Image (tube, rainbow, N blue to C red):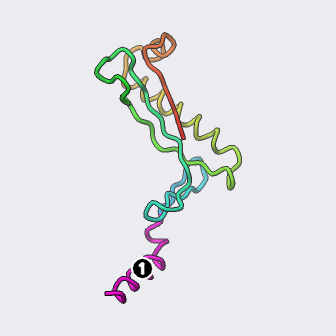
Amino acid sequence: MRKICLITFIGLLTTSTVNSGEITQNGKVYSTGTLGFRADPYVIGCIYDTLDASFGGKCAQRSLKWYFNEGKYPGSLNEAYEKCRNDLYSRGINKYVNFARGLSEGDYTIECSG
């Protein structure tokens, strides 16, 4: 049983490039991790509909994950937040009537967090 576990563990280590994910955003390559480990951090956001009581604190629309790595790409954190806000804004425009006006009047809020 130990040998099988050891062989499986070594197999996972040697094939980590197969299991590791990479994603290219804005011409930069980010790591999505190997089985969830060693992934670059990301920013994700939500649109909150403050008019609809059924949503309450729930996320009405979720943005894509926008990865960043300040060590490799200085300024990528600010880019990720900007992309998150732009993504949510375009989703809101496509989903809701008068989203831009509702956003300025407090009917909707956009929040991105990393």
**Front residue (pair 98, 41):** 41
Note whether 35 is above or below 8 in the view shown. above
Q: Quadrant of residue 56?
A: top left
- How many C-alpha atoms fall within 10 Å of the one at disc 1: few (<14), some, or many (≥20)? few
Looking at the image, how many numbered discs can be counted on the residues?
1
Instruction: Decide whether residue 23 is among the magenta residues.
Output: no
The secondary structure that most of the magenta stretch takes on is helix
- Residue at the extreme left: 54
Note whether 87 is above or below 66 in the view shown. above
- 64 with respect to 54 (left or right): right
Q: Position of residue 86 (x, y in %)?
A: 53, 31
Q: Position of residue 84 (x, y in %)?
A: 52, 36
Give the magenta-colored segment's residue range. Answer: 1-20
- 44 with respect to 57 (left or right): right
Q: Amino acid at mark 1?
A: Phe
Note whether 62 is above or below 108 in the view shown. below
- Residue at the extreme bottom: 3
Instruction: Decide whether residue 5 is among the magenta residues.
Output: yes
- 72 with respect to 107 (left or right): right
Q: Position of residue 102 (x, y in %)?
A: 45, 13
* SS under mark 1: helix
**Rendered residue at 36%/14% (across/down):** 51
Q: Position of residue 108 (x, y in %)?
A: 44, 19
**Rendered residue at 38%/21% (across/down):** 49
Note whether 15 is above or below 33 in the view shown. below
- Residue at the extreme right: 74
Residue marked by disc 1: 9
**Rendered residue at 43%/64% (across/down):** 35
The quarter of the rendered structure image containing the N terminus is bottom left
The quarter of the rendered structure image containing the C terminus is top right
